Image (spheres, grey):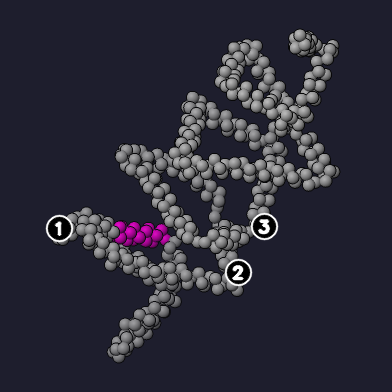
């Protein structure tokens, strides 16, 4: 143990509050002297000294006599001194020399405390596990005596009692201070300070990273803390949520409903209204600030996106996009494999997935039924406006441009499209397709017959009407189609 104390004495820093530094003691004495010479400190002593002497005297008669005489003398002395123009403590704290000395004292105190803590931690580190456990049980556990919780509870009760009679008490009490704080803070200087500190903070981050990467093993260990932290959060959440499993369904539902009822619906509505109004104003302001047909925000977004794209490596960017897609596909495949390896999950997935589809279809049907419930006038008016707002020409242009691209590719390199179509049709199982079609045709007398009877006659009539001779650019193609149809019919007759 002596060796441990010697080592602790060698490794521990010198604690100034322990009196080892004469300069520190002199600075402490001068600072206290200046504080005690202020009016506020002397008035405090006038009130405090009699109480201290009374406690010191206790039940002793001679002590009570001495304390009475001493209290009168000190009271007279401090009272007289406090009335003789001693400086106020506010003025004292405006003295740069005093503030410098005070900060030096605080630094020394914290340095001493830090030294004590380091020495204590080093001593605990060298102790056997049983001694460490004993100290943790007998000493450190005393700190968790629960008084802090009781204090918080008492404060909460006081606030609750006040708010029962005066709900706006806290707002009224804090409002003057908040107004003064807002009025006294120069937000322009605060903004300038934030902007000015940005390079320094970035430089600090760079310095920290440079220092960390001097020890790659420590960087790896630091990063390894993230999974541990995630595990701790996950397990803690699991413990909390697992307690809900023990609650009966009706009680749990009642709790959820009670919590949901406490949500302030009008507040959410107001927030939504305010947010939508802000979006509308920003959109309107963008149109007002921009040129005709060119709002300002899309222009700004285009400029920023161009800056981002220019500074991005296109090869790496799209490699990353493909990698993300492959990772997602791998995840989906892994999920599918896991389902197939667990027959119960696979069975439930096959049985329940149609229910999800049914729910989506029910939602669509409910939306359609809302229109069906409208009267004809309202229905026609709404859908007329909706269809009028639909840009059919733009939709047609999309199809036109797609067809132009296909035709252009067909003219320049028809083999490409032929190869794609060939691969597509060759990949289709002809027998399976023929068998499926045969099933449909063989069922012409069954459930599909009404549909066929309602569609095929009109389709044939329409085709015949389209193939009639006309003087237009497509007459040559129509004539070939009529000849092909005539040949087919004549061959059948023969």
Residue 440, image x, y percentages: 67, 27
Among the 4 quarters of the image, the one containing residue 218: top left
Query: Which mark, by number, is residue 266?
Result: 3
Q: Earlier in the sequence, mark 2 or mark 1?
A: 1
Q: Earlier in the sequence, mark 3 or mark 2?
A: 2
Does residue 319 appear in the picture of this structure?
yes
Give the prevailing secondary structure in the magenta stretch: helix
Q: Which residues are magenta?
A: 95-115
Among the 4 quarters of the image, the one containing residue 411: top right
Name the residue: 45% across, 65% down.
91
Residue placed most toward the observer, 336 or 60: 336
Residue 232, image x, y percentages: 40, 51
Q: Earlier in the sequence, mark 1 or mark 3?
A: 1
Name the residue: 71% across, 22% down.
400
Query: Which mark, by number, is residue 167?
Result: 2
Numbered disc in front, either 1 or 3: 3
Query: Which mark, by number, is residue 88?
Result: none
Q: Is residue 386 left or right of residue 114?
A: right
Q: Which residue is mark 1?
A: 3
Name above or below for residue 378 compared with residue 82.
above
């Amino acid at each position: 143990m002596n060796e441990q104390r010697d080592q602790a004495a060698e490794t521990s820093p010198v604690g100034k509050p322990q009196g080892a530094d004469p300069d520190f003691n002199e600075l402490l004495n001068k600072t206290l002297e200046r504080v005690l010479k202020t009016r506020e400190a002397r008035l405090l002593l006038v009130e405090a000294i009699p109480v201290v002497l009374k406690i010191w005297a206790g039940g002793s008669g001679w002590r009570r006599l001495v304390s009475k005489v001493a209290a009168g003398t000190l009271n007279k002395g401090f009272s007289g001194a406090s009335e003789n123009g001693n400086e106020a403590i506010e003025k004292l704290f405006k003295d740069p020399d005093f503030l410098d000395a005070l900060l030096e004292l605080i630094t020394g105190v914290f340095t001493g405390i830090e030294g004590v803590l380091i020495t204590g931690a080093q001593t605990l580190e060298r102790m056997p596990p049983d001694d460490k456990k004993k100290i943790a049980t007998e000493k450190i556990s005393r700190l968790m005596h629960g008084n802090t919780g009781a204090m918080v509870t008492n404060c909460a009760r006081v606030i609750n009692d006040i708010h029962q009679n005066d709900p706006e008490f806290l707002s009224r009490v804090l409002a003057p201070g908040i107004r003064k704080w807002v009025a006294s803070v120069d937000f322009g200087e605060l903004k300038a300070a934030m902007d000015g500190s940005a390079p320094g903070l970035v430089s600090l981050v760079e310095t920290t990273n440079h220092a960390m990467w001097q020890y790659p093993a420590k960087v790896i260990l630091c990063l390894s803390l993230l999974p541990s932290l995630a595990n701790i959060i996950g397990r803690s959440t699991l413990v909390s949520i697992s307690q809900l499993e023990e609650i009966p369904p009706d009680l749990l539902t009642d709790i959820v409903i009670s919590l949901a009822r406490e949500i302030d619906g009008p507040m959410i509505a107001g927030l939504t209204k305010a947010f939508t109004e802000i979006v509308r104003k920003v959109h309107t302001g963008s149109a007002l600030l921009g040129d005709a047909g060119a709002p300002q925000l899309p222009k700004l977004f285009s400029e920023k996106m161009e800056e981002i794209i220019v500074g991005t490596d296109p090869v790496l960017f799209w490699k990353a996009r493909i990698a993300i897609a492959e990772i997602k596909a791998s995840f989906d495949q892994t999920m599918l494999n896991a389902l197939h390896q667990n027959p119960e999950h696979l069975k439930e997935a096959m049985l329940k997935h149609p229910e999800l589809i049914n729910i989506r279809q029910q939602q669509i049907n409910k939306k359609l039924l809302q229109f069906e419930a409208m009267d004809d006038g309202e229905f026609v008016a709404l859908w007329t406006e909706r269809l009028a707002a639909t840009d059919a020409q733009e939709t047609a242009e999309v199809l036109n441009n797609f067809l132009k691209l296909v035709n252009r590719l067909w003219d320049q390199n028809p083999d490409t499209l032929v190869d794609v179509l060939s691969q597509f049709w060759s990949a289709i199982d002809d027998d399976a397709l023929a068998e499926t079609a045969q099933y449909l045709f063989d069922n012409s007398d069954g459930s599909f017959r009404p549909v066929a009877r309602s569609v095929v006659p009109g389709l044939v009539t329409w085709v015949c009407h389209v193939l009639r001779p006309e003087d237009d650019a497509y007459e040559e193609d129509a004539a070939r189609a009529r000849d092909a149809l005539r040949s087919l019919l004549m061959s059948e007759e023969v």
